[in-house]
């Protein structure tokens, strides 16, 4: 079972797998959460616990085990260029980097890392066992999350995410091959809060991950993902949009942009801003990160927002490449109305597809 808690709603999806590895969406629910969550932080814990417990009982869920997603605004994703060493040794180097060189914008940070360009027989990003560690002391964190993962301002590339990433065109030392390492950090306080809510509702949290990975898994299992090249996943919500780039099955960028699509926002202006931001992130990946030969095979759109289809149509006008909407693909559905809700359920579906994996 996958669970996503946003500022607007609580979303659950339950997936069942048969022996021939066919996947079915057997159960789902979307419940509004008015005045319960603000900026990803649960402000009314008892009420959210009660709602979650009630929904699980009403759905008659077949499992108590749940995978969760951490709100993107409380995640920091950073790419590091480090010596290509075994993971056990690399862990010590990452710990050193976090302690001395990487500024984590959380009072009590918790982080995870994985090698991206491992040798051909090494585990892929989706299946590698992460090394997760608490780190840092109160007061050691950066003063501003925006400073650690700045969004684009006035089209200046140096303000985009990964502005401090080493130039990949620089010559590597002959004595030591280097590798790319993806570092993901979040607030331990937030992680503990989400886990506590799930436990109090009578469920068992198995894992927490970043939204980009959940979306990728949902696309992979529905056979929509482009495995041979780069593609973009855009997840639209009322208060912010996540833009992630994958290349050959690996997450290369994940960017959260506070573009509002609520009732008070001007829809055309918001769509124009989002189209510009998607272009900006794609160009940043191509030119600033030295991937000039990258061809984006798909722009896949998901999300949970009013006027979703209208937003997608307006994005078609603002982007050179036509976006495609997340759809069930090879994932069977048991409820007639589920297929139309797949864009809104993409994240919890991707979470549920983790199965028993912790």
Image (cartoon, rainbow, N blue to C red):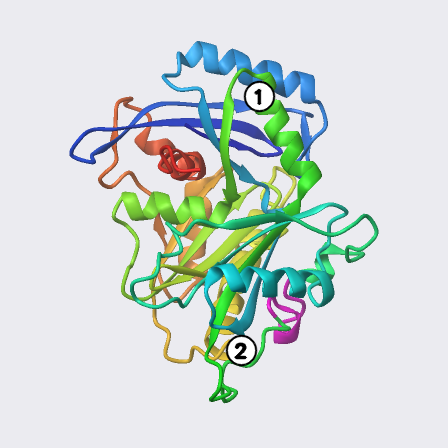
As drawn, the label of residue 99 is none
Determine the main secondary structure of the stretch shown in magenta. Answer: loop
As drawn, the label of residue 199 is 1
- Whether residue 33 is visible to the viewer of this picture, yes or no, is no
- Seen from the viewer's position, the closer of residues 179 and 315 is 179
* Crowd class of label 2 (few under 14; some 14 to 19; many from 20; radius 10 Å): some
Q: Is residue 300 left or right of residue 271?
A: left
Residue 131 in the image: state x and y as whole percent.
52, 51
Residue lying at the far front in this picture: please name it. Answer: 89
The answer to whether residue 273 is above or below residue 265 is below
Give how far apart the Cα atoms at labels 1 and 2 are.
44 Å
Residue shown at the point (33%, 47%) measured from the top left: 219
Kindly identify which residue carries mark 2: 288
Residue shown at the point (27%, 23%) measured from the top left: 336
Q: Is residue 159 magenta?
A: yes
What kind of element bears circle 1? helix
């Amino acid at each position: 079972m996958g669970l996503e808690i946003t500022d607007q709603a609580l979303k659950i999806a339950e997936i069942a797998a048969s022996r021939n590895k066919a996947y079915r969406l057997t159960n789902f629910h979307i419940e509004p959460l008015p005045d319960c969550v603000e900026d990803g932080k649960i402000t009314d814990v008892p009420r959210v616990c009660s709602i979650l417990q009630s929904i699980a009982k009403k759905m008659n869920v077949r499992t108590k085990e749940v995978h969760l997603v951490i709100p993107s605004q409380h995640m920091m994703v950073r790419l590091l260029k480090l010596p290509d060493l075994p993971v056990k040794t690399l862990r010590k180097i990452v710990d050193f980097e976090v302690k001395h060189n990487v500024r984590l914008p959380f009072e009590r940070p918790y982080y995870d890392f994985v090698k991206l360009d491992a040798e051909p027989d090494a585990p892929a990003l989706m299946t590698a066992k992460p090394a997760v560690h608490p780190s840092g002391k109160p007061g050691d964190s950066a003063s501003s999350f925006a400073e650690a993962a700045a969004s684009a301002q006035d089209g200046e590339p140096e303000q985009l995410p990964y502005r401090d990433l080493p130039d990949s065109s620089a010559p590597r030392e002959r004595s030591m091959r280097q590798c790319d390492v993806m570092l993901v950090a979040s607030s331990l306080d937030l992680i503990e809060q989400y886990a506590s809510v799930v436990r109090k509702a009578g469920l068992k949290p198995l894992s927490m991950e970043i939204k980009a990975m959940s979306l990728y898994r949902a696309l992979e299992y529905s056979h929509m993902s482009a495995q041979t090249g780069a593609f973009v996943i855009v997840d639209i919500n009322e208060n912010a949009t996540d833009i992630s780039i994958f290349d050959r099955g690996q997450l290369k960028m994940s960017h959260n942009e506070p573009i509002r699509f609520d009732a008070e926002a001007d829809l055309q202006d918001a769509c124009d801003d989002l189209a510009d931001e998607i272009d900006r992130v794609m160009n940043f990946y191509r030119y600033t990160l030295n991937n000039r030969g990258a061809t984006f095979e798909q722009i896949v759109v998901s999300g949970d927002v009013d006027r979703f289809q209208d937003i997608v149509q307006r994005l078609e006008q603002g982007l050179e490449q036509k976006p495609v909407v997340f759809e069930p693909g090879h994932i069977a559905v048991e409820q007639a109305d589920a297929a139309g809700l797949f864009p809104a359920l993409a994240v919890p579906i991707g979470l549920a597809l983790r199965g028993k994996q912790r």
